[in-house]
Image (spheres, rainbow, N blue to C red):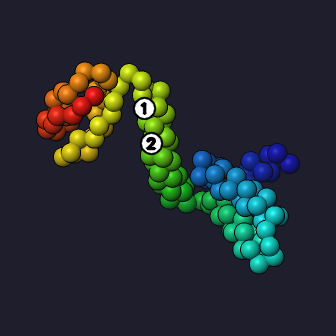
Amino acid sequence: MKQKFAKFMYGRYGMDSLSKFLTYLALILIIVSAFLRPYTKIVFFVLSVLCLFLTYFRCFSKDVPKRRAENVKYLAFRRRITDWFMLRRDMWKQRKDYKFFKCPSCKALLRVPKGKGRIRVVCKKCGTAFERKT
């Protein structure tokens, strides 16, 4: 049986990060639909079935380059979100020692030590200088 499945899956894409996310999303939608009213329940259930269908379609697809490109886009999107949250976490941890400013021209995030009074901040990215109180 295991060999038959391996032979069937040969040349197919299989599971990746996007497929796993869609599977978890479908599971969450099914659980949420159990607690909703009848019409809303149907909508959530249909969305969960569509997510599962898309997951199986991706797993059994033989168009590997296209599925890989979709996964790369998903991973880039997920990376932007996780980077944003990690930056906020780091800023929270450093809030006692540093103050954070955005550059007025390029919007880069700059970190300066607290308690120095009014200082001149120079952006390392674009070279713009501005004064702020720390």
Figure quadrant of residue 91: top left
Residue 128 location (% of width, % of height): 14, 38
Viewer can see residue 115: yes
Observer-nearest of 43 and 95: 95
Three-letter amino acid code at disc 2?
Trp
Neighbor class of circle 2 (other Cα within 10 Å; few <14, some 14-19, many 20+) is few
Local secondary structure at mark 2 = helix
Residue pictured at 82% horizontal, 64% vertical: 34
Residue 127 horizontal side relative to residue 42, left or right: left
Three-letter amino acid code at disc 1?
Met
Q: Is residue 36 above or below residue 13?
A: below
| Residue for badge 1 | 91
Q: Is residue 79 above or below residue 53?
A: above
Q: Is residue 99 above or below residue 36?
A: above
Do the residues under discs 1 and 2 have CB atoms within 8 angstroms?
no
Observer-nearest of 132 and 9: 132
Residue pictured at 73% horizontal, 51% vertical: 7
Residue 80 location (% of width, % of height): 44, 46
Residue 110 location (% of width, % of height): 28, 33
Q: Residue furthest bottom?
A: 39
Residue 62 horizontal side relative to residue 110, left or right: right
Q: Earlier in the sequence, mark 1 or mark 2?
A: 2
Neighbor class of circle 1 (other Cα within 10 Å; few <14, some 14-19, many 20+) is some
Observer-nearest of 14 and 101: 101
| Residue for badge 2 | 84
Residue 124 location (% of width, % of height): 20, 32
